[in-house]
Amino acid sequence: PLLNFPEISMWGLYPWGGWGATALPERITRFWRQTGDKLSGGFLYSEGLFEDINKVIVAQLYFWGDRDPDETLREYAIYELGMADAAPFLELVHTLEKTHTAVATAGMCDLGDVARTYELACEIDEALPQWAKRCFRWRQIFLRAVLDSRRYPACFARFGKMRVDDEDWKALLREDEVCIEAFRELVGIYHSVDDFEEDPYHRRVRPLLS
């Protein structure tokens, strides 16, 4: 029997938590199907709150084996967000992952998918109970949809691609008040500090404000 140390935080995104929630259920489940029969559990490599969904997906796989990630997402939507109908949430998470994967592997994504993600996030937000609207689990998902919907079209228009370094992102978004407010809210959710000079790793997670 083996124990593993799955990387659920950093793949394909920088800063890792700086754009809101990172949810990769299909990627995680695919790796599990390649290795799960050799494993007897493990320890999650977590960098923060932003991969909350990934933690739940992996934990369910450890306990239940080859489990459909949609079942886990459905339970997450019902239990953590009080949703009666989880279908829009599943579509939202899968479309976020589709965009994330496309940019990570090809430097491009479908702007139609980006627009659909934002549309779904707004529809879900409108229907959620008040307590769920305010919880960090939902807010970081919603803010990810907001940020993707603004940064990817702007980045493609400026650079002809959608994967650039953090200095280019800062230059592109520093005048976008919607993005700046989203970053400020994420800083609050993560309890990030402004001064990270003593910690060279801090900027790898903190939203791009300075």
Image: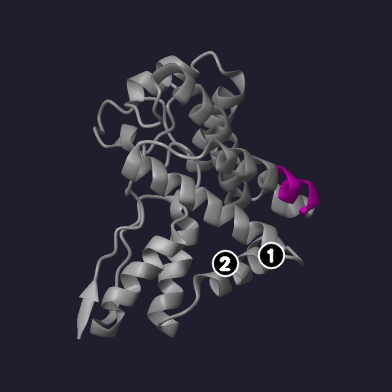
Residue 21 place in picture, x, y as percent: 50, 47
Residue 35 place in picture, x, y as percent: 26, 76
Residue drawn 32% across and 26% down?
A: 165
Helix, strand or loop at label 2? It is helix
**Label 2, label 1: how far apart the Cα atoms are:** 8 Å
Residue 161 place in picture, x, y as percent: 39, 28
Is residue 185 visible from the viewing direction of this image?
no
Circle 2: residue type: Leu
Q: Give the range drawn in magenta.
A: 122-128
> Which circle marks residue 109 in the picture?
none
Residue 20 place in picture, x, y as percent: 50, 42
Q: Quadrant of residue 108?
A: top left
Q: Relative to 19, is 165 above or below? A: above
Disc 1 target residue: 86
Residue drawn 45% across and 24% down?
A: 155
Q: Which class describes the residues within 10 Å of circle 2: few (<14), some (14-19), or many (20+)?
A: many
Circle 1: residue type: Ala
Q: Relative to 112, is 166 above or below? A: above
Disc 2 target residue: 73
Q: Quadrant of residue 142?
A: top right
Identify the image quadrant of the C terminus. top left
Q: In which quarter of the image is residue 72?
A: bottom right
Is residue 9 visible from the viewing direction of this image?
yes
Which of 32 and 180 lies nearest the eye of the viewer? Answer: 32
Q: Which class describes the residues within 10 Å of circle 1: few (<14), some (14-19), or many (20+)?
A: many
Q: Is residue 124 magenta?
A: yes
Helix, strand or loop at label 1? It is loop
Q: Do the residues labelled 2 and 1 touch (CB within 8 Å)?
A: yes
